[in-house]
Image (cartoon, rainbow, N blue to C red):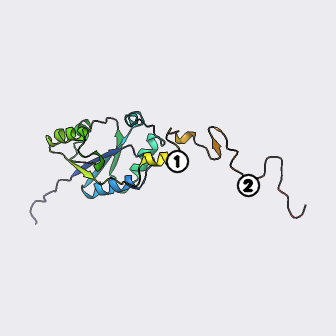
Amino acid sequence: MDGPEIKKRQIVGYASGVFDLFHIGHLRILQRAKALCDRLIVGVTVDELVGYKNQKVVVPFAQRLEIVSGLKAVDLAIPQDDLDKFVMWKKLKFDVMFIGDDWFDTDRFREYERKLKSVGVKIVYLPYTTDISTSGLKSKLGTASARSVSQLRVGRRNGRPDRRSKSKLPRKGHRKRTAAD
């Protein structure tokens, strides 16, 4: 008979974000975070809190949560209903928090570092993907005003038919001529 089994304590990590227009930068930061912990919890910011960035989301919360939940690197995706990381720690009791290095040395995160260090939590700043961002994508797509996905329709502009798109389908009441005609 072997001696008593010693269970290794799992390291629980926490990362959060809006994850609107999910892109490779989002994926990479979550993969890097997962590589540094045993269990990764990801807070997806609810639509009502996104205004802190003076932005509106394009992809609704429920869809963003489902996308993040479906990632191999994510063990649990939850609503982030409070932007205060210390409040989230009180709810989840994670051991390490992951954030993009674009937040490094900001007043906001110096304060989080102080508070979280007092309860034994370390903040790990992961490399921010500089060649892509959601705001850059929105700008390129012309959605800076961020119409919701449910309002977007193929072949329509501003709620009206887009006359610039030339359909290959015959109009109603017209039939395509054939060689037999």
Instruction: Categorize mark 1 by other alpha carbons within 10 Å: few (<14), some (14-19), many (20+).
Output: few
From the top left corner, tell me how far across and down residue 50 is, in percent: 40, 36
What residue is at 63 percent from the left and 37 percent from the top?
A: 159
Q: Quadrant of the N terminus?
A: bottom left
- Toward the right, the furthest residue is 181
Residue type highlighted by circle 2: Lys
Determine whether, in the image, residue 15 is placed left or right of residue 138: left
- Toward the bottom, the furthest residue is 1
Report the front residue among 118 and 101: 101
Report the front residue among 28 and 164: 164
Which of the 4 quarters of the picture holds residue 5?
A: bottom left
Q: Mark 2 or 1, which is nearer the eye?
A: 1
Q: Quadrant of the C terminus?
A: bottom right
From the top left corner, tell me how far across and down residue 78 is, in percent: 35, 43
Q: Earlier in the sequence, mark 2 or mark 1?
A: 1
* Element under disc 2: loop
From the top left corner, tell me how far across and down residue 19 is, in percent: 40, 46
Which residue is identified by label 2? 168
Report the front residue among 144 and 24: 144
Circles 2, 1 touching at the beta carbon (< 8 Å): no
From the top left corner, tell me how far across and down residue 56 is, in percent: 45, 37
> Is 141 rendered above or below residue 46?
below
* Element under disc 1: helix
Which residue is identified by label 1? 141
Residue 100 seen in this snapshot = no
What separation in Å lies between label 2 and label 1 (alpha carbons)? 25 Å
What residue is at 33 percent from the left and 57 percent from the top?
A: 31
Instruction: Categorize mark 2 by other alpha carbons within 10 Å: few (<14), some (14-19), many (20+).
Output: few
